Amino acid sequence: MNNRSSDRRFFLCTGEAVTADRLALYPHSHIIGELRYVLDEGRRVTALARWECSVTTRLEPPIKPDVDIYLIGDARDIKCRFAGCHNKERWEIGQAAIMQLLSHYRKYDMRDV
């Protein structure tokens, strides 16, 4: 994946996912992480790469931020880590990830368990 800021989509503490050119429209928000494509069992799915530190949208996003977790699937109460911010958001699974999870579960017949 290209690391240029203009190609990246950032996930904000207010729940929006925006490109770098739209960050200025959210001056009171913070970047929790970014959307990235990852391989999950050979299939490319969208994940939320949550950063170790949230940063303000007023500054240029870091080029290679430290990521503490890749979220594939629904996640609730993702807390903003910017000092003084109490926002919590939900990351919702993308369609490609849903299909990947369904194909994984079809491999197993629950009657055999």
Image (spheres, rainbow, N blue to C red):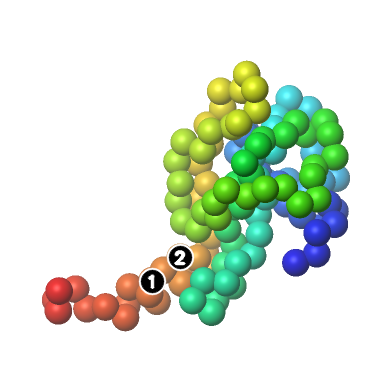
Residue 113 in the image, given as x and y percentages of width and height = 15, 74
Q: CA distance from mark 1 to mark 2?
A: 6 Å
Above or below residue 88? Residue 45 is below
| Residue picked out by circle 1 | 102
Q: Is residue 66 left or right of residue 70?
A: right
Residue at 32% across / 80% down in the picture?
Answer: 107
| Residue picked out by circle 2 | 98
Q: Is residue 75 left or right of residue 86?
A: left
Q: Give the quadrant of the N terminus.
A: bottom right
Q: Nearer the viewer, residue 55 or 23?
A: 55
Residue at 32% across / 78% down in the picture?
Answer: 106
Secondary structure of residue under mark 1: helix
Residue 23 in the image, given as x and y percentages of width and height = 80, 38
The answer to whether residue 92 shows anywhere in this view is yes
Above or below residue 96? Residue 89 is above
Residue 76 in the image, given as x and y percentages of width and height = 45, 41
Q: Is residue 31 left or right of residue 101?
A: right
Q: Amino acid at mark 1?
A: Leu
